[in-house]
Amino acid sequence: MAASSAPCCIILLFTIVAIAECGSVGINYGRVANNLPTPSRVVQLLRSEGVERVKLYDSDSSVLAALADSNIAVVIAMPNEVLGRAAGSRTFTDSWIQSNVAQYYPRTKIEAIAVGNEVFVDPNNTTEFLVLAMKNVHLSLVKVGLDSAIKISSPIALSALQNSYPPSSGSFKREIADSVMRPMLDFLRETESALMVNAYPFFAYAANADKISLDYALFNDNAGVTDAVNGLKYDSLFDAQLDAVYSAMKTLGYDDIRIIVSETGWPSKGDENEVGAGEDNAAAYNGNLVNRVLTGKGTPLKPEEELEVYLFALFNENEKPGPTSERNYGLFYPNEEKVYDVSFGGGNKAPRNGSKSQNPPSGQSWCVASENAGEEKLQSGLDYACGEGGADCRPIQEGATCYDPNTLVAHASFAFNSYYQKNARGTGTCDFGGAAYVVTQSPRMGKCEFPTKY
C-alpha cells in the first residue's frame, strides 16, 4: 500500500479505524458474562464511539443480526470444539458457512473468519485438525462465492514461539514449526490472508518485572532495547514481540505474510501477584497503543507494514475463569461506562465529570482540530477552550501572531492545543466532542508555532 505524501496523523478519521495509510484499531467483543447489554445496545455503543471494526469469539445469531447495516467490519470465529468436525467433513463446513456467514452477508459486513483460537494451547488438543479445518472452511466460502471477500486465519498465542528474544532470533516451537505452521503459512500465502497473533506485553512484563522496564511495556519514553544481532532498536515490547513472530515466519521462508494483532490489552485490575495490573497502566498502554498504530508506522523489522490491531476487550467479563485480571481487561463496564478514558481514534476522550487523568502520552505531542468535525462542533470546542477551559487564546486574536490563517480549523487547533498542553497532555484532554485528536509531529499554520507546554 502506497504511503501518503502527508503525515497520516494529520488526516485521520475520528473513528477506531483510520484511513488505510494510518493503520487501524478494532476491538474484541467477548461475552463471557451474565450482565452485558443486549447486542443491539452494544452496536449502538460501538457506533457512538466510532468503532468500525469488531472481532467476535463465535458467530452468535443475535449479535450478527444486530450488526446488520451498521457498516462495522466483523471477524467471526469458529470455536475450537468443532475443528474436528470441520476438518473431517466438507458437508459440515458447507452448512456452517451457510448458517453463520451466507445468511448474514453482506448486510453484516463479515470480513474474516478466525478458525479456532490459540489452538496450540487448547487442552483438548485440537492442533491436528487446524489446517484442514481452515482449508475446508475456505472451500465452503468458494462454493458460495465469498472467498475473495472473506479471509481466513487462526489466532496464535506468543507461546507458539520457541525463542522470542532477541526479536531477530524468533522461531516457532519445534513440534509445530514444520507440522502445522509451515502448511498454515502456505495456506495464508495462497489465500492472501494474514497471520493472527495474540500479543500481550503485560504477561511478559508481569513475569519479568525485574528485567523489563514498565515504560518499555507501556510505550512510554524509555531508553529502548537494541537487538544485538541486527542492530535494530526497539522502543516498545509490543514491537519486539511482533518482530519475533515475523522472524519466526522468515525462518520458515514466509517473510511476505503480514500480521494482524487479533488481541492485545492490559488489565485494569489484578491479583497481588499480577505485577503491573492497574487502571493507570491499562489507560497508558491502550491509549499509547492507539496513538502508535495510527501513526501508520510498522515495526522496526517491517517499517512499511501498517498495523492492524484489535484491543482486548470491549467489556469486563465477570464469568471468565482464572486470576482477577481475566475479568478486568474491558474498556467498558457492563453498564456502558468507561473503565478509563481512551479515544479509539487517537488522542483522548473528554474527561468525565471534569476530571483529568495524569497519564500523558509519551514523547512530544500536540492536539489539533479535525477538518471533518463540522463548524458547529469546532466552534463549540473553541468557545469552551478559550472560555471555561482557560486556554491561552490571545495569540489567535486579530492582529496577534497566530491570527493567520484566519480559519476556524486553525484557530480551534491552537486553542485545543493550548488546553491540552495546559493540562499536561492528560488522557481526556484532547477530544472536544470528537473534534480533536493528538498528533506526534509539530503542526504549523502560517508563521504560528504550537508550543509543547504552557
Image: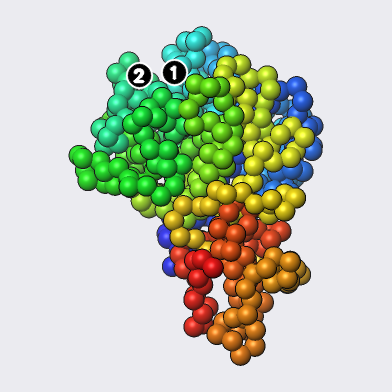
Question: The N terminus lies in which quarter of the figure?
Answer: bottom left
The residue beneath circle 1 is 120
Q: Name the kind of residue labelled 2 in the image.
A: Ile
Q: Are marks 2 and 1 in contact (CB under 8 Å)?
A: yes
**Mark 1: few, some, or many residues within 10 Å (few <14, many ≥20)?**
many
Question: The C terminus lies in which quarter of the figure?
Answer: bottom right
The residue beneath circle 2 is 176
Report x, y in % for residue 208: 38, 27
Question: Residue 183: in sight, yes or no?
Answer: no
Report x, y in % for residue 284: 53, 44
Question: Residue 330: in sight, yes or no?
Answer: yes
Residue 365 or 165: which is nearer the viewer? Answer: 365
* Left or right of residue 376, residue 210 in this image: left
**Mark 2: few, some, or many residues within 10 Å (few <14, many ≥20)?**
some
Q: Residue at x 44, y 56 (%)?
A: 363
Q: Is residue 256 above or below residue 405?
A: above
Report x, y in % for residue 202: 47, 31
Q: Residue at x 49, y 21 (%)?
A: 273
Report x, y in % for residue 166: 27, 34
Identify the secondary structure beneath mark 1.
helix
Q: Is residue 41 above or below residue 181?
A: below
* Left or right of residue 215, residue 287 in this image: right
Q: Name the kind of residue labelled 1 in the image.
A: Phe
Pointer 2 or 1: first along the chain = 1
Residue 34 or 129: which is nearer the viewer? Answer: 34
What colouring does the structure picture have?
rainbow
